Image (cartoon, rainbow, N blue to C red):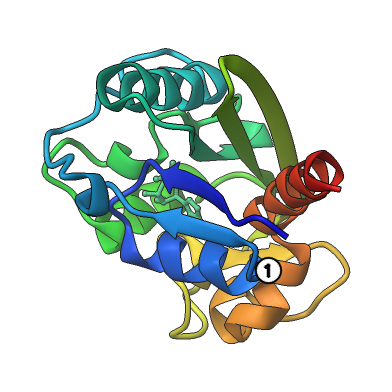
Amino acid sequence: MNKIELVFATNNQNKLKEVKAMLPDFFEIKSLSDINCFEEIPETEATIEGNAILKANYVSNNYNVNCFADDTGLEVESLDGEPGVYSARYAGLDTNAMKNIEKLLFNLKEKTNRKAQFKTIIALNLGGKQFLFKGICKGSIIDQLRGTEGFGYDPVFIPTGFDKTFAEMSLDEKSNISHRGIAFKQLIDFLKNLSI
Ligand code: IMP
């Protein structure tokens, strides 16, 4: 089977690791640094979908490659979908995961509804066409941090049907049920069908 070469438009090593672990051998995944793309890719749209499309188009148009880009947000029901598209910079531009979590827990202090979901959108630009894939993982936000694995909001997110946070799961366990895992499974199924 011919290898499918695709650029994954990310600089996030955690995501690269997660995605590579899910992909079969017939994909040759290149990172942005592999194609000498070192500039900041714009993420200026107001929706998760918009940002995934913006990033994929930026890389395809500027580097003339097949590529996919993902964008993820945590949507909390009682906060009207916040932090959503602002998940990475919820506590400000100069922030980190811990500060984002602190702000989230503060805003949820008086709330009894702790329902939340992660949403991932993948935009794939392949052969001049664009395809979108979506993964949702529903769960709830707890009021204390638990676990040391993963990244971002993992220590406070318990997926529905489980009694541990994402940060208490192995990478495999998380990928099986996660928003990103679901979206990437769809991408992979799609590409497998193309390559038959
Ligand atoms: P990105 O679009 O994948 O870079 O995600 C944006 C932000 O959402 C990240 O900076 C994290 O704060 C959060 N996030 C994305 N995926 C996850 C995850 O799997 N677990 C926890 N937080 C995540």
Residue at the image position 34 percent from the left and 24 percent from the top: 64
State the residue position of label 1.
Answer: 24
| Residue 143 visible in the snapshot | no
Looking at the image, the residue that sits furthest to the front is: 2
Residue 147, compared with residue 44, is above or below; it is below
Residue at the image position 26 percent from the left and 56 percent from the top: 99
Of residues 189 and 2, the one nearer the viewer is 2
Residue 48, compared with residue 149, is above or below; it is above
Of residues 173 and 139, the one nearer the viewer is 173
Residue 9 is left or right of residue 164, and the answer is left
What type is the residue that disc 1 sits on?
Answer: Pro
* Quarter of the picture holding the N terminus: bottom right
Q: Position of residue 41 (x, y in %)?
A: 24, 29
Of residues 43 and 74, the one nearer the viewer is 43
Residue at the image position 62 percent from the left and 15 percent from the top: 129
Residue at the image position 50 percent from the left and 51 percent from the top: 109
Residue 11 is left or right of residue 154, and the answer is left
